[in-house]
Amino acid sequence: MIDQFNVVANAVLLEVLPQHRKRIGICGAGGIVDSAHLPAYKKAGLEVVAIFDTDNAKAQDVAKRHGIPTVYKTLGELLSDANVEIVDIAVPADAQPEIFAQVAAAKKHILAQKPFATTVALGEAMVKQAKEAGIIAAVNQQLRFEEGVAAAHKMVELGWIGTVSNFSINVNLITPWELWPWAKDLDRLEVMLHSIHYHDLIRWFLGDAKTVFCAAGRTPGQFPIGETRTISTALYASGVTSVVHANHVNRGGDNYAEYRIDGDKGSIRGTFGLLYDYPNGRVDTLEVNSQVLPTDGWLPYPVTTRWFPDAFIGTMGSLMKTISTGAPLRSSVADNIGTLKMIEALYTSMDSGKSVDL
Ligand SMILES: NC(=O)c1ccc[n+]([C@@H]2O[C@H](COP(=O)([O-])OP(=O)(O)OC[C@H]3O[C@@H](n4cnc5c(N)ncnc54)[C@H](O)[C@@H]3O)[C@@H](O)[C@H]2O)c1
């Protein structure tokens, strides 16, 4: 059994080979750069040469604490720096398209934060800009690289649970929305900013859905105006189903974040430790119950790294590998259009109260 786990462990290793490494310039010095991007890059031995934020004091502070040698006052200066090979964008989604267009025009490779864009039309225009500029651009849907779910993906690929019939994600959290003042007045909140991770992840396993339905709710007294509870279901052409239930105003105080993948020869179940006490979190869990191996019941798989910061090595590392070798990207901007279509369909369903065909 240890040998079989070895195959999975080798497939989900998060490392960036020295010959693939490129120099990074960062646009945005906010919470996620400070707490996840930069710690991940340090762990992987990646070089961040410069940073820019419209809030210069914030950029100075982050640069000082993380040892980034240059702080620029404008995006133009960052883009003129020949040392910057990849621009890592991490700003609120509304600001991203304008920055993306300028970075593409400067012919620097891009890692864009999620949501890549807030509409499919905007996202498609950005994919076109990247293609015309001849740059490689990826989206930071780093959950695709989280060790536990990446291991689950490999187990499914190896046929350990047979043919997949359903993917469920169920999270019930006390999310500190106060950390993101810019999100307070967003009409489109939960699916656009949070569950987009789950919908993108499920697409990685199951492909594009055929029909979706989404019901959304709010809790009296909540901080943001947008939806904070969503229940999304999807049906695939093969008859496979998926469900995502996410609540961010858990007044019960018992945070949990669970997922489960069922197949005709077994099941996989796991937890996202990060969300039990965001952003500190606890270890992830993963178990497999397989009639194929067989496992004789639920067998724990040892997950040794975390969503934050480790999975961020995956998105940046995969971009660097693609730039160096032409290997396929796990989270390309072109692929992300499918995720944006899913998100748009879920909001159409939420607004109309009807299911929506993709
Ligand atoms: N798991 C994840 O991948 C994850 C987690 C949290 C946030 N995010 C995403 O990352 C982005 C940033 O989130 P955050 O939590 O760091 O927010 P934040 O509010 O902490 O920081 C945003 C930063 O962007 C800067 N900024 C705004 N407009 C800018 C512009 N035009 N040019 C340069 N800098 C600009 C702000 O000054 C601020 O420092 C958002 O899109 C968010 O959805 C992703």
Image (cartoon, rainbow, N blue to C red):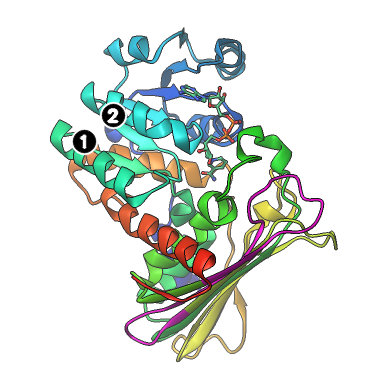
- Residue extending farthest to the front is 352
Where does the image place residue 73, in percent across and percent down from the top left? 46, 8
Residue 292 sits above or below residue 246 on the image: below
CB of mark 1 within 8 Å of CB of mark 2?
A: yes
Label 2 residue SS: helix
Identity, as a three-letter code, of the amino acid under mark 1: Gln
Q: Which residues are magenta?
A: 214-241
Residue 355 sits above or below residue 65 on the image: below
Residue 300 sits above or below residue 179 on the image: below
- Dividing the picture into quadrants, the one containing residue 218 is bottom right
Q: Give whichever of 232, 334 is nearer the camera.
A: 232
Q: Where in the image, quadrant-wise, is ligand 1 located? A: top right
Residue drawn where x is 49% and y is 31% of the image: 91
Q: State yes or no: Cβ of the residue under disc 2 lies below 8 Å from any atom of ligand 1.
A: no
Residue drawn where x is 21% and y is 48% of the image: 327
Mark drawn on residue 101: 2
Label 1 residue SS: helix
- Dividing the picture into quadrants, the one containing residue 79 is top left
Label 1, label 2: how many angstroms apart (C-alpha)? 7 Å
Identity, as a three-letter code, of the amino acid under mark 2: Ala
Where does the image place residue 236, in percent across and percent down from the top left? 37, 80
